[in-house]
């Protein structure tokens, strides 16, 4: 696609047309100011709760906008896509609502919750490949074999225009926003939002920055915009943006309109998911927390700015969410596993437990190791999982134990 074709395919007019087209079929989700997160980060933070869509993700917008522009004959035969989850749910929900058969090819690694939710809204799921790119290749094969119409999850101007309606709503609800921090997988969301933001900036003669965020494990768009070749792969919490190859169309839009892209590490993603649940009482998946993760990791850069963050999805497996929350407690010092070396004699463990009680630290679990250790035969290692008020209380306990002559170490969290 030429640059001129790119310019004409996605504009503020096509985004406004998408907003009118999809109308009330998608939720106008709230954009709310977060006092606590703003205080924590030094920025003024508005959150766009796209996790409150019926399918818990913004992807409904682009999927519906695309469906409403397809030929009736193509709709009758059915559509197909490849998706890590959220696009599949949006396309399945609105396709079923419109009477369109929908086939979804998902990677085998897709969280069970996303497979179940896609099937529950009418999609036929095919599991193939270990990542999006392998699922995508299989979907193209089925498209040709079955005569279906492929609806791309991000590399399509109609899909990107639908996603751009997120920005229209944000600016309508919080016109003071001067910086959008937007997750990037394939680039559909940020392409639409950047197009809307830059048009608004031009209309109002002011500056609006658009900052993209990618997981460091999957820096595909980041690498493209810099002409670099970076490794891409791994088990990211943000599987919704774990895309090895960004769109051909979207990378042109990003190169033209996005001011910068930052990379975030897994611990910041985990912390952001936990904070949003603890502070805002809202469940987000890793990709949905990427914007906040970027701000947490770059507080000085965003200090004083009026930030708009998109909580783009809330489909996270409950077991994974539980792990994230427990790991966050461990990082904050509220949960810990301490390894204490004892002499293997009656009363040794009781004395240690007395020290925990005196420090008012709760013991959750105790395990002994006598065999697989390099200690003398009369020694043993005891791992004690415990719960403290905070890291200060925990360190006070460790100091107390060492003062009593015990060898104490943390069993570190990866």
Image (cartoon, grey):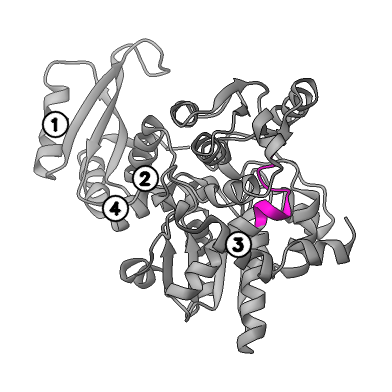
Q: CA distance from mark 4 to mark 2?
A: 16 Å
Q: CA distance from mark 3 to mark 2?
A: 33 Å
Assign a secondary structure to mark 2: helix
Q: Which residue is mark 2?
A: 328
- Count neighbours of disc 3 (C-alpha within 10 A) and say few if under 14, some if 14 to 19, many if 20 or more: many
Q: Which residue is mark 3?
A: 164
Seen from the viewer's position, the closer of residues 319 and 40 is 319
Q: Are marks 4 and 2 in contact (CB under 8 Å)?
A: no
Residue 353 - label: 1
- Foreground disc of the pair 4, 2: 4
Stretch of the chain drawn in magenta: 151-160
Q: Residue at x 22, y 50 (%)?
A: 396
Assign a secondary structure to mark 1: helix
- Foreground disc of the pair 2, 1: 2
Quarter assignment of residue 212: bottom right
Q: Position of residue 24 (x, y in %)?
A: 45, 56
Q: Position of residue 201 (x, y in %)?
A: 63, 81
Q: Which residue is mark 4?
A: 281
Q: Residue at x 14, y 31 (%)?
A: 353
Dominant SS of magenta comes to loop
Seen from the viewer's position, the closer of residues 328 and 340 is 328
**Is residue 264 among the parts visible in the rendering?**
yes
Q: CA distance from mark 4 to mark 3?
A: 26 Å
Q: CA distance from mark 3 to mark 1?
A: 58 Å
Q: CA distance from mark 4 to mark 1?
A: 36 Å
Q: Are marks 4 and 1 in contact (CB under 8 Å)?
A: no
Q: Residue at x 65, y 59 (%)?
A: 161
């Amino acid at each position: 696609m030429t640059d001129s074709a790119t310019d004409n395919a996605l504009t503020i007019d096509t985004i406004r047309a998408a907003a009118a087209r999809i109308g009330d079929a998608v939720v106008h989700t709230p954009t709310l100011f977060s006092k606590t997160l703003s205080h924590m980060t030094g920025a003024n933070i508005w959150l766009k709760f796209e996790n409150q869509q019926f399918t818990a993700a913004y992807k409904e917008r682009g999927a519906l906008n695309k469906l409403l522009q397809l030929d009736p004959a193509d709709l009758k035969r059915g559509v197909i896509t490849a998706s890590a989850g959220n696009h599949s749910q949006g396309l399945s929900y609105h396709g079923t609502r419109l009477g369109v058969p929908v086939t979804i090819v998902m990677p085998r690694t897709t969280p069970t919750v996303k497979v179940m939710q896609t099937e529950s809204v009418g999609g036929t799921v095919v599991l193939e490949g270990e990542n999006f790119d392998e699922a995508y290749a299989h979907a193209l094969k089925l498209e040709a074999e079955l005569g279906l119409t492929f609806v791309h999850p991000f590399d399509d101007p109609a899909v990107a225009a639908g996603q751009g309606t997120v920005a229209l709503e944000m600016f309508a609800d919080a016109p003071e926003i001067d910086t959008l921090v937007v997750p990037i997988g394939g680039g559909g969301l940020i392409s639409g939002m950047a197009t809307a933001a830059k048009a608004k900036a031009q209309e109002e003669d002011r500056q609006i920055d658009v900052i993209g965020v990618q997981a460091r494990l999957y820096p595909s768009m980041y690498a493209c915009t810099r002409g670099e070749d970076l490794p891409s792969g791994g088990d990211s919490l943000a599987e919704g943006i774990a895309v090895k190859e960004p769109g051909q169309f979207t990378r042109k839009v990003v190169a033209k309109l996005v001011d910068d892209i930052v990379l975030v590490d897994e611990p910041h993603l985990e912390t952001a998911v936990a904070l949003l649940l603890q502070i805002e009482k809202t469940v987000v998946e890793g990709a949905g927390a990427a914007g906040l993760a970027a701000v947490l990791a770059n507080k000085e850069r965003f200090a004083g700015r009026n930030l708009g963050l998109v909580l783009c999805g809330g489909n996270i497996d409950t077991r994974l969410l539980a792990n994230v929350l427990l790991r966050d407690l461990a990082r904050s010092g509220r949960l810990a596993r301490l390894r204490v070396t004892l002499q293997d004699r009656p009363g040794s463990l009781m004395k240690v437990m007395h020290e925990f009680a005196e420090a008012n630290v709760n013991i959750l679990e105790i395990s002994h190791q006598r065999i697989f250790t390099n200690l003398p035969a009369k020694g043993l290692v005891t791992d004690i999982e415990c719960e403290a008020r905070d890291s200060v209380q925990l360190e006070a306990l460790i100091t107390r134990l060492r003062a009593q002559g015990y060898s104490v170490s943390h069993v570190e969290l990866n």
